[in-house]
């Protein structure tokens, strides 16, 4: 498996960017509402700091914004042009979807950001 494929898999699995084994979040389930935004300080496998500097995740807001904007355009376009729904109904569906996906989008944007900034170490040994 290529390095890029492994990194993308780690992003979606929300794993540590350095070792691809430790969880980025205290509660690994994106569907749980019990402390969904809490992250450990370090990876429990390799010790990688998950917040290397204050304000590190500021850039993940831009990732989240871009993902949400394209997702919104896609959903509204499908609702209006494929299902021939009104704009109001399409917006209602979008708001419901975004309310359900909010936690996952937040966590995924952080996962993408840290995986872009921290290099994977294939020679890492426990």
Image (cartoon, rainbow, N blue to C red):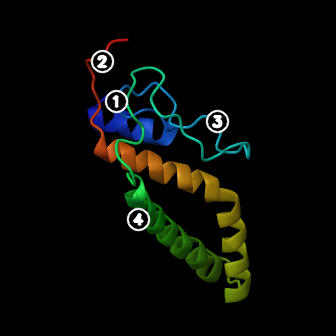
Of the image marks 2 and 1, the number of the one nearer the N terminus: 1
Q: Which residue is mark 1?
A: 18
- Left or right: residue 118 versus residue 26 is left
Can residue 79 be seen in the rendering of this structure? yes
**Mark pair 3, 2: CA separation:** 24 Å
**Mark 1 secondary-structure assignment:** loop
Mark number, residue 53: none
- Left or right: residue 39 versus residue 97 is left
* Label 3 close to label 4 by CB (< 8 Å): no
Q: Which residue is mark 2?
A: 124
In the depicted structure, whether residue 51 falls above or below residue 20 = below
Number of labels in the image equals 4
**Mark 2 secondary-structure assignment:** loop
Image quadrant holding the N terminus, namely top left
Of the image marks 1 and 4, the number of the one nearer the N terminus: 1
In the depicted structure, whether residue 49 falls above or below residue 55 = above
Mark number, residue 62: 4
Q: Which residue is mark 3?
A: 27
The residue under the point 45% across, 45% down is 111
**Mark pair 2, 1: CA separation:** 8 Å
* Label 4 close to label 2 by CB (< 8 Å): no
Neighbours of disc 3 within 10 Å: few (<14), some (14-19), many (20+)? some
* Label 1 close to label 4 by CB (< 8 Å): no
* Label 2 close to label 1 by CB (< 8 Å): yes
Residue furthest front in the image? 54
**Mark 3 secondary-structure assignment:** loop
């Amino acid at each position: 498996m290529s390095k890029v494929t492994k990194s993308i898999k780690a992003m979606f699995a929300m794993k540590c960017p350095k070792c691809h084994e430790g969880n980025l979040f205290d509660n690994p389930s994106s569907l749980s509402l019990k402390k969904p935004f809490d992250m450990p300080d370090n990876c429990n496998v390799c010790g990688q700091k998950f917040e290397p500097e204050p304000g590190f995740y500021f850039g993940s807001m831009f990732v989240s914004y871009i993902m949400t904007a394209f997702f919104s355009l896609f959903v509204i376009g499908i609702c209006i042009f494929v299902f021939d729904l009104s704009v109001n109904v399409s917006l209602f569906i979008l708001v419901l979807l975004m309310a359900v996906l909010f936690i996952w989008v937040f966590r995924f944007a952080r996962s993408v950001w840290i995986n872009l900034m921290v290099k994977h170490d294939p020679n890492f040994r426990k």
